[in-house]
């Protein structure tokens, strides 16, 4: 009885966030509107019209939305549970590879070597048969399962080993970065069967539709917008639930949560796995839009960059992760066109700026200005 009372006191002491979440509802409404308006402007408006959006722009916007979904998955564990993962790009890449394997199986005899079963890179490397882990991925439902299972299983195993051993803080961050670096080195090897340093590319179709067609590009953008809206709704549901209150308590005082009897490692593993699967979905939607997936997506810098997106937008707000990802990647697109070699300096400066002067990110700044105005 005393333990149950202590649990109620601990969770009751946490601030209860408003269930209305007006900014979140506005974001979801904007995403649903964009899922209709952007494809319509691309396919129905004539070229030269002020309303027309080019296929290139549609693809670029779709990439931004995939990055926003990745940032959302990081904010779920970092902002609400205090788990700073510097290796979430690994889960993004694993989801991307699952999609890439499905797309490679759709090429069939249209490859350079015309082999109906083996992808071109396997024919070039004299593979005699398809590896066992490629079987079944020519069917979309099984490929979708792999998009969730690949990052989910890796995250579960990593989380179970790390959180069970009570690895936290900077040590966990270093371990997560070591994970993505190890995967990058593994996927670079030709004998792994994932295309080596060239990765997977030269995709032809998805679900029977030409992957280069404007209609397919528009559909992929709409799918990305809907996935981001659904991902945001799922994350909001999680953080507003009892589980969300427990993990927030873990972020604020893990020792106290353990004292009242909660199995902290179970909560961490569950949340970390769910976050990784969300990142995998982002990677799976990213690959058909960019047309390639290679081991470079595992690079530690990719994961660090995603953490910067969350910090710039506002950690622990969910909507800040989306805002930060969209803002930083748009800035990257513009700035790299003006000074390609200087982007990393700008990115580092952004992180320092946020850390020193804007600890709440852009969303925190907006909220502070709104409070001052009232």
Image (spheres, rainbow, N blue to C red):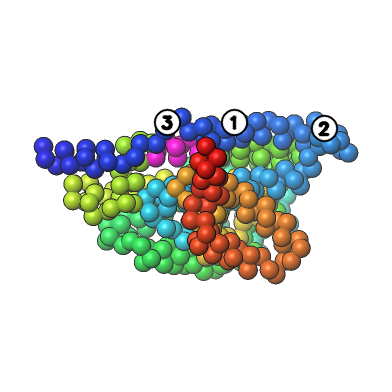
Measured in 3D between alpha carbons, the distance from the residue under mark 1 to the one under mark 3, in whole angstroms, is 17 Å
- The foreground one among 115 and 331 is 331
**Main structural element of the magenta stretch: helix, strand or loop?**
helix
Magenta extent: 231-239
Q: Is residue 340 above or below residue 116?
A: below
For the N terminus, the image quarter is top left
Task: Kindly identify which residue carries mark 1.
Answer: 29
The residue furthest right is 48
Please tell me in which quadrant of the rendered image residue 42 appears: top right
Percent coordinates x, y for residue 34 in the rendering: 66, 34
Tag nearer the camera, 1 or 3: 3
- Horizontally, residue 132 falls left or right of residue 325, namely left
State the image coordinates of residue 161 (x, y, percent, origin top left).
31, 59
Q: Is residue 341 a member of the stretch shown in magenta? A: no
Crowdedness of circle 3 by 10 Å Cα count: few (<14), some, many (20+)? few
- The residue labelled by disc 3 is 19
How many C-alpha atoms fall within 10 Å of the one at disc 1: few (<14), some, or many (≥20)?
few
Tag 1, which secondary structure?
A: helix
Q: Which numbered disc, 3 or 2, marks the residue closer to the eye?
A: 3
Percent of width and height locating residue 151 = 46, 51
Q: Secondary structure at mark 2?
A: loop
Instruction: Specify which label sits upstream in the sequence, 1 or 2.
Output: 1
Residue displayed at 27% across by 41% down: 13
Determine which residue is flagged by label 2: 45
């Amino acid at each position: 009885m005393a333990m149950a009372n202590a649990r109620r006191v601990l969770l009751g002491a946490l601030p209860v966030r408003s269930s209305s979440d007006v900014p979140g509802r506005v974001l979801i409404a904007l995403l649903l509107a964009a899922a209709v308006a952007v494809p319509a402007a691309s396919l129905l408006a004539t070229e030269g019209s002020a309303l027309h959006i080019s296929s290139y722009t549609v693809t670029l916007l779709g990439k931004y939305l995939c990055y926003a979904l990745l940032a959302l998955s990081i904010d779920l564990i970092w902002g609400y549970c205090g788990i700073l993962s510097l290796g979430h790009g690994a889960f993004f890449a694993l989801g991307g590879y699952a999609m890439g394997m499905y797309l490679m199986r759709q090429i069939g005899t249209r490859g350079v070597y015309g082999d109906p079963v083996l992808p071109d890179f396997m024919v070039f490397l004299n593979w005699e048969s398809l590896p066992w882990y490629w079987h079944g991925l020519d069917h979309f439902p099984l490929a979708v399962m792999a998009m969730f299972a690949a990052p989910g299983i890796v995250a579960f195993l990593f989380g179970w080993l790390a959180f069970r051993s009570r690895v936290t803080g900077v040590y966990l961050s270093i371990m997560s970065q070591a994970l993505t670096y190890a995967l990058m080195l593994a996927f670079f090897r030709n004998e792994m069967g994932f295309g080596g340093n060239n990765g997977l590319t030269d995709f032809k179709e998805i679900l029977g539709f030409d992957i280069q067609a404007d209609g397919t590009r528009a559909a992929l953008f709409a799918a990305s917008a809907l996935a981001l809206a659904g991902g945001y709704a799922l994350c909001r549901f999680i953080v507003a639930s009892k589980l969300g209150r427990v993990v927030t308590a873990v972020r604020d005082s893990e020792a106290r949560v353990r004292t009242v009897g909660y199995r902290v490692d179970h909560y961490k593993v569950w949340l970390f796995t769910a976050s990784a699967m969300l990142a995998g979905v982002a990677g799976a939607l990213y690959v058909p839009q960019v047309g390639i997936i290679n081991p470079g997506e595992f690079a530690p810098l990719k994961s660090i960059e995603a953490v910067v997106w969350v910090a710039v937008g506002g950690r622990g707000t969910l909507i800040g992760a989306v805002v930060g990802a969209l803002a930083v990647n748009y800035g990257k697109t513009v700035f790299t066109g003006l000074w390609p070699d200087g982007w990393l300096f700008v990115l580092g400066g952004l992180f320092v700026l946020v850390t020193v002067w804007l600890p709440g990110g852009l969303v925190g700044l907006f909220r502070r200005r709104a409070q001052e105005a009232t």
